[in-house]
Image (cartoon, helix red, strand yellow):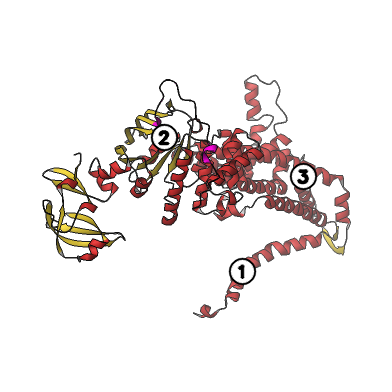
Amino acid sequence: MKIDTDFNAKNLMPEAEPPVEDGATKYDVELVAVSKSYDGGAKAVDTISLRIPKASYCCLLGPSGCGKTTTLRMLAGHESVTDGDVLIHNRNVTDGAPSARGTSMMFQSYALFPHLSALDNAAFSLKIKGVKKAERHAKAMEFLKLVQMDHLAHRMPAQLSGGQQQRVALARSLITRPKVLLLDEPLSALDPFLRVLMRTELKRIQTELGITFVHVTHSQEEALALSDLVVVMSDGQIMQAGSARDVFEKPSNAFVAKFIGGHNVIDVEGRKVSVRADKCRIVQSVGGTNIPAEVTNIEYQGPMVRILVKDSDGKEYHAQISDSRFFADPPVIGEKVTFSWMPEDEWRLAA
Amino acid sequence: MSSMTMSPRIASWLQATPFTLIMTCLVMVPLAIILAVSFMDYGFAEIIPEFYLGNWTDLFRSSLTVDTYATVFRQLAMVWSITLVLGFTISYYLVFHVRSNMWRAIFLAACAIPFWTSGPIRMISWVPLLGREGLVNQALFGMGLIDQPISWLLYSEFSVILVYVNMLTMAMAGPIANSMAKISPSIIQAARDQGASEWQVIQEVIIPLIKPGIVVGTIFIITAVMGDGFLVRAMSGNQMNTPAVAIMNEINAFQFPPAAAKSVVLLVIVLGMVGLLLRFVDIRKELAR
């Protein structure tokens, strides 16, 4: 994707705010013991606390129903907070209106106004503020240029593809000059090719604008690729929050290790450990743990090959080995092998 | 089966035949007869099949024509504006504010149940309410607010408009609610997110998106008010004259040719109004989904 180098996205954002006097904060978003329950029922979000540092890309990752979208909607102000506080730029916005919090939300279905052109969609917030037509159109055009949609500015949403609609939705959100942009599963409706392209684009725009993006996703691949901060959620609670590398290399518990993928969760002497599948082998390891097993499936993945095995108790393990090593001596399904790993590759999980 | 060998052309013609027959026999032929009769002479309770332009010249020379149309357009304007405001408000409340399904069902039932009685009965039941000795006057008198009955409550333009509104509000509210229900909640949230107040959401998002519904409702109101004679006669106590009342009076007097001429004019005007509305808003969008 071509990036317009003459175009400086920073100019579109407000001049750096004067430093906050007392209580200056390093965080764009702070959630303090936030809970959400519906009609006094079970908690959709259960007492979560989270700090998102300035200008970071944060992904809320988890299976459906884990509370990630509810958390995002509470940040946006489209969902009331049952308990706890939401702070944005060190200001308590728990009960503030959506437009008064310095956030802007990009909806999963894009939610473009079907009766307005791409340009008028992008200019909507300015029209609401009473900005004159020529001025708001000029401004909207700058933002459409940022998302590379200026050439289709006069199309109606129905005449745009999903990816194009999303770019317009992004321009419409950014034009409100949010401190924090909230994205609800922004890539899930796109085809896989476009998804990777748009992912790069989102990261580029976030870096250029220097604001915080909070991005809800159920794809661990997306979260690892984009995030400065990955927040893994399950059952309304935060399982782990950390850098992508930390979450992948040092999962805090079995749920995280399984959800993030690429890990074996194994009981070793009564405690749970995780071992990355790419550290496991299907040959004897000297000084390692060796388990006799049978190959049950082989998945070719290009640079890597994933091999599933089953031990005599029926417990399943998987190993990822490089294609060159695999093809040097390819095992076949049903073959008896030794599944092994080294003790230094074991990562101890919380109970 | 023999139909497997039938050419698609013939199949299409066969499929179109029943509707073509109905349209021809029940719409086109009667209209053609009305048009033909409008150019015929008449005597007492008879049509004289001779070419005669008098029905048309009388129609265009008579100040009565202008008066009846002035009356019906005034009524239409009032009924349309009141039903539009009521219809919008009711639909907006039902679609965007009623959260529980139980209350929505109760409100919908409240809207629908009156239609279990026939139109004329609903119309006539206003009489004991609005008359000089009616409930309203008695209640006001009993409260000491008036010392003699209000006479303009019944058999007046007020009662005509009131009953029209009573009969037609749902015809406006229905299509509007249908349009509103199609607006995705996330679009409303997006507008709020962009800083729009509730009123701005209505102005900038909801009203543009329900235009087809408003047009469908408006067509219902136009055809109902322009074509009605019974309600006006009953509720005005035979004191108001609209084009439809004029046509009914002539039919009752067996003066079919002038009634036919007036019908043709009324039909052209109504079709013109509907055609004009359809030029501005594409209601196919509304019917399609």
Q: Which quadrant would residue B153 be assigned to in this image?
A: top right
Please tell me the numbered disc located at residue B16: 1
In terms of secondary structure, what is the magenta stretch mainly?
Answer: loop
Read off the chain for label 3.
B
Q: Residue at x 27, y 61 (%)?
A: A323
Query: A344 or A262: nearer the eye?
Result: A344
Query: A272 or B75: nearer the eye?
Result: A272
In the image, the segment drawn in magenta is A6-29
Residue type at the position of mark 3: Thr
Read off the chain for label 2.
A
Q: Residue at x 72, y 29 (%)?
A: B151
Helix, strand or loop under label 3: loop
Q: Which quadrant would residue A92 be assigned to in this image?
A: top left
Q: Are marks 2 and 1 on the same chain?
A: no
Residue type at the position of mark 1: Ala
Neighbour class for label 3 at 10 Å: few (<14), some, many (≥20)? Answer: many
Residue A259 on the magenta span: no
Residue A78: image location, x then y, percent: 45, 36
| Residue on which the image places disc 3 | B242
Residue A237 appears left or right of A181: left
Image height of B223 relative to A240, above or below? below
